[in-house]
Image: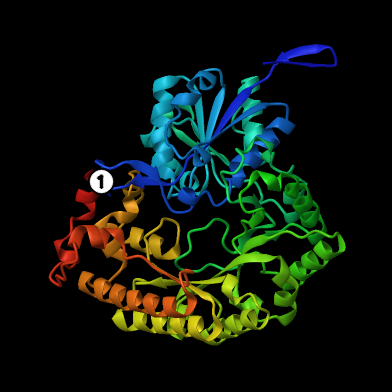
C-alpha cells in the first residue's frame, strides 16, 4: 500500500487483527462439530478491543484489517489467506476461554505465511507470556494494555529499530532469550476517553445483538474467584466525555439486532455519583440508549441511582456469588446477604427487577452440600419475593484468580491445561475445584429443575432461573450416582498435562 502525503510516497505497513471465538466440539469430543459456545454462540456484542485497536492503528497511518471470526462463527482463516500473505504483522487477542482457538489460528498462519510476524495480546497471553513464547511459534506478546504499545511496536518493526523501547512487550531476543520490557503506567480515565471510537461501520449488519462501549477499566475489588484484568485498579472516563462517546457510538446502532449498547466495564456503577451524572447528561442531550451493564449490589441500594438508570436499562447483571455471609466474606465481595436483598428490593420498587440477573456460583472449593443449598435457597427467595432473574453456575477453574493461583502453587493446575478445546469440560479440572460428589451434583440439579418448573407456572416460558448441569459430569457419569468416583480415581496432574 502506498500513501501519498505532502507529495511524498511511502509504503504503509499492513496489520491484520484477529478476534478468535470461544469454541468447543458439539458432542464433547473431537468427533463432534467445532462451533462457537457461550457468549460467542449468541453474538452478544463485538470484541471491543480488536475494533478499537484497528481504529487506533489507522489513526497512526497504518492499514488495519479486522478479521472478526467471532462474527463469522468459525476458527478458520482460509478465506482470508490471500490478504494475510500481504500483511506485515498479525495480532491476535485472547482470553483463557478463547485461547485454544487463538492457538489453532497461530498454527494455521504458520502454514499459510511461515515468515509473518505474530503478536498476541489479551489476558491469557499476558499471564503466560514466557510459556507461550517458549512453546509456540509467536514473535511478540504485549502484556496488559495495548492501545499505546501496539503502534510503538509497529513503528519499531517498520523502521527496523530497537524493540527495547516498546512498553509492555515480551519477545524473543538474541539466542531465543525471552526479554520482558518494562510495563508502562496504566492509562488514566482521561486517556481512555481520548481514544477514537471503534469504527463499527465495518461490522456485518444484524450479526451482533448490541454494540460494545467502554466507560471504565478495571475494578476496585479483588474477588477470590475473579480472573478479569486490572483488579484493584479502576479508571473511569469522565461522565461528559463518556456521554459524547456514547452519542457517537449510537450512530452505528442500526448495525445490531436489538438496538442496544453493552457497557463492557467490569462494574459500570462503581462511582454512583458519576453514573447519576451520566444519566442526567443523557436526559439533557435527549439521548435514549438501551443499556446492558454490570452493577454491584452495594451501588443499587441507592434510590437515586436506580431511579435515574431505570429508563435506560435493558438488562443488568449483579454478581451475587453466594447466599450465605461466610461465603461472601471469603470471596471478598464487600457485600452481605442483607445488601443483596436490599438491592433486589430497590430494583423491584423502580420496576426493573425483571431486567436484573443475579448470578450465583455453586461449588466454590470450600463448599459442601450445605453451603450450596444455602445459596440456592437464598437465590430462590430473591426470585420469588422480588422477581429478579437467577443465574446458577458451577465454579470453573479459570486462570488468573486468587483461588486458581493457590491451586497452581500447590501443583493442582497449571497453564498447560488450557491449550485444548473443551478444557472447561475436563473432569480433572472440574473435580479439582468442586468438592461435592457427582451424585450430589445430580441431586442438586434435580432440585433446581424442580424450582424451574415451579417458576414456570408463575412466569411462563420466560427464563427466570437459568441453570445447566456441568457437561463434564453428565458426560462422564451418564446419570449414574457413583459416590466412589472421588478425586483419588482421577489422573494425576502430570498425566493430564502430558495427555
Measuring 66% from the left and 69% from the top, which residue is drawn there?
Answer: 270
- Please tell me in which quadrant of the rendered image residue 64 appears: top right
What is the x, y in percent for residue 465?
A: 44, 72
- The crowd level at tag 1 (other Cα within 10 Å; few <14, some 14-19, many 20+) is few
Measuring 58% from the left and 51% from the top, which residue is drawn there?
Answer: 209
Above/below status of 69 relative to 414? above
Q: Quadrant of the N terminus?
A: top right
Q: Is residue 371 left or right of residue 201?
A: left
| Viewer-proximal residue among 489 and 252 | 252
| Viewer-proximal residue among 377 and 242 | 377
| Viewer-proximal residue among 295 and 479 | 479
What colouring method underlies this structural image?
Answer: rainbow
Q: Is residue 339 visible?
A: yes
Disc 1 designates what residue? 29
Measuring 54% from the left and 52% from the top, which residue is drawn there?
Answer: 44
What is the x, y in percent for residue 440?
A: 24, 75
Above/below status of 215 relative to 196? below
Secondary structure under the numbered disc 1 in the rendered image = loop
Amino acid at each position: 500500500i502506498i500513501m501519498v502525503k505532502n507529495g511524498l510516497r511511502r509504503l504503509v505497513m499492513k496489520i491484520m487483527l484477529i478476534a478468535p471465538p470461544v469454541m468447543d466440539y458439539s458432542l464433547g469430543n473431537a468427533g463432534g462439530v467445532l462451533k462457537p459456545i457461550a457468549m460467542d454462540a449468541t453474538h452478544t456484542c463485538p470484541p471491543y478491543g480488536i475494533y478499537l485497536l484497528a481504529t487506533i492503528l489507522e489513526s497512526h497511518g497504518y492499514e488495519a484489517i479486522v478479521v472478526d471470526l467471532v462474527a463469522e462463527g468459525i476458527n478458520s482463516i482460509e478465506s482470508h489467506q490471500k490478504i494475510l500473505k500481504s500483511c506485515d504483522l498479525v495480532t491476535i487477542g485472547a482470553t483463557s476461554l478463547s485461547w485454544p482457538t487463538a492457538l489453532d489460528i497461530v498454527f494455521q498462519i504458520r502454514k499459510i505465511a511461515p515468515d509473518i510476524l505474530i503478536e498476541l495480546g489479551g489476558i491469557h497471553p499476558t499471564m503466560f507470556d514466557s510459556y507461550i513464547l517458549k512453546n509456540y511459534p509467536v514473535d511478540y506478546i504485549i502484556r496488559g494494555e495495548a492501545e499505546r504499545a501496539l503502534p510503538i511496536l509497529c513503528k519499531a518493526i517498520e523502521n527496523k529499530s530497537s524493540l527495547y523501547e516498546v512498553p509492555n512487550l515480551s519477545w524473543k531476543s538474541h539466542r531465543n532469550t525471552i526479554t520482558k520490557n518494562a510495563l508502562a503506567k496504566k492509562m488514566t480515565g482521561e486517556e481512555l476517553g481520548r481514544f477514537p471510537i471503534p469504527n463499527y461501520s465495518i461490522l456485518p449488519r444484524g450479526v451482533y445483538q448490541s454494540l460494545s462501549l467502554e466507560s471504565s477499566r478495571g475494578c476496585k475489588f479483588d474477588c477470590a474467584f475473579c480472573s478479569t484484568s486490572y483488579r484493584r485498579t479502576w479508571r473511569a472516563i469522565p461522565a461528559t466525555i463518556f456521554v459524547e462517546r456514547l452519542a457517537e457510538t449510537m450512530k452505528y446502532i442500526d448495525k445490531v439486532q436489538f438496538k442496544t449498547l453493552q457497557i463492557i466495564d467490569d462494574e459500570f456503577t462503581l462511582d454512583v455519583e458519576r453514573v447519576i451524572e451520566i444519566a442526567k447528561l443523557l436526559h439533557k442531550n435527549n439521548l435514549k440508549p438501551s443499556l446492558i451493564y454490570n452493577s454491584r449490589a452495594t451501588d443499587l441500594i441507592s434510590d437515586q441511582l436506580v431511579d435515574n438508570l431505570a429508563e435506560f436499562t435493558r438488562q443488568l447483571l449483579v454478581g451475587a456469588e453466594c447466599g450465605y455471609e461466610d461465603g461472601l466474606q471469603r470471596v471478598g465481595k464487600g457485600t452481605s446477604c442483607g445488601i443483596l436483598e436490599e438491592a433486589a428490593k430497590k430494583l423491584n420498587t423502580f420496576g426493573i427487577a425483571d431486567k436484573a440477573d443475579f448470578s450465583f456460583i455453586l461449588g466454590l472449593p470450600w463448599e459442601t452440600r450445605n453451603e450450596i443449598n444455602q445459596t440456592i435457597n437464598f437465590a430462590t427467595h430473591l426470585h420469588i419475593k422480588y422477581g429478579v432473574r437467577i443465574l446458577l453456575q458451577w465454579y470453573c477453574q479459570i486462570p488468573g484468580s486468587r483461588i486458581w493461583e493457590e491451586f497452581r502453587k500447590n501443583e493442582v493446575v497449571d497453564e498447560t491445561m488450557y491449550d485444548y478445546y473443551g478444557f472447561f469440560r475436563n473432569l480433572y479440572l472440574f473435580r479439582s475445584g468442586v468438592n461435592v460428589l457427582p451424585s450430589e451434583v445430580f441431586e442438586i440439579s434435580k432440585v433446581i429443575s424442580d424450582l424451574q418448573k415451579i417458576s414456570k407456572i408463575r412466569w411462563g416460558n420466560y427464563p427466570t432461573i437459568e441453570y445447566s448441569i456441568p457437561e463434564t459430569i453428565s458426560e462422564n457419569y451418564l446419570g449414574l450416582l457413583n459416590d466412589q468416583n472421588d478425586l483419588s480415581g482421577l489422573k494425576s496432574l502430570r498425566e493430564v498435562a502430558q495427555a
